[in-house]
Amino acid sequence: MFTSTLSVLALACTALAAPNVARAATSAPPSGFSISSVAALGTGCPPGTSYVLVSDDNTALTAVFSEFYAVAGPEVSISQNRKACQLTVSVKVPAGYNFGLKNIESAGYYQLDSGVSASQGSYYYFQGGLSQASAWTEFRGPVQGKEYIGKVDYDLTSSVRSPCGKDVVLNILNDVRVNNSKNKQGSGAIAKDLVNLKQTLNLDWQAC
């Protein structure tokens, strides 16, 4: 039932993901690249419920969430069906290079009754730009309770890329949703507790 779903969900939010590498890693970042600052904001990451770790060499970050979950059920407000969290990342880009986002690794948990579905995904864009890229993973019930560890991939042939050789602000909106429109008496929940942005796996660099 819905109460037990939330209880299990709270425990699941403490899990961390291991990288799931399906493709060869990208080359090392060009000299001069670094992540200078990161901020998180949204309904899925209220103040005090998330933290962001930047690697010692400023080339990778990990965001961890404790309350990033969406739920649906017969007594649940529709406002709880979707949660989002935007990561705002300031990136120093060396002259002669640009980059796009290859994929985002993530981990979480979902529990769905029959006829209930859920999705998790993200889209990204560069501040001041008009284009964005998105990638999603969908789940369908019935599922008694299952962890997911994986990544969403962006189409590199149409990937949104940063301006050449210019420092940029990269915005990444992470999203989780639950839909019980096909079973109004059914309940479901999905949580996202980790988003990895490790450069050796996720950024696609090009000379420009």
Image (cartoon, rainbow, N blue to C red):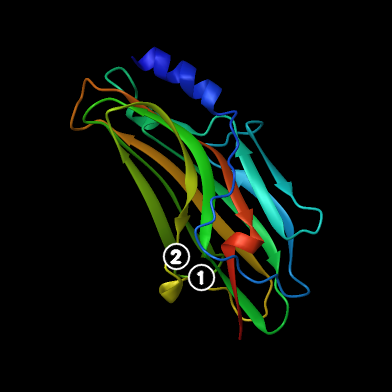
Q: Disc 1 vs disc 2: Cβ atoms closer than 8 Å? A: yes
Residue that numbered label 1 is attached to:
129
Split into 4 quadrants, where in the image is the N terminus? top left
Along the line of sight, which residue is nearer the eye, 125 or 10?
10
Does residue 158 sit above or below 140 in this rendering? Answer: below
- Could you say where residue 124 lies in the image, as x and y percent from the top left? 50, 60
Say which amino acid is labelled 1.
Gly
Q: Is residue 112 left or right of residue 89?
A: left
Along the line of sight, which residue is nearer the eye, 147 or 82?
147
Residue 191 seen in the figure: no
Image quadrant assignment for residue 166: bottom right
Image quadrant assignment for residue 76: top left
Tally of marks? 2
Secondary structure at numbered mark 1: loop
Q: Residue at x 68, y 52 (%)?
A: 61
Say which amino acid is labelled 2.
Gln
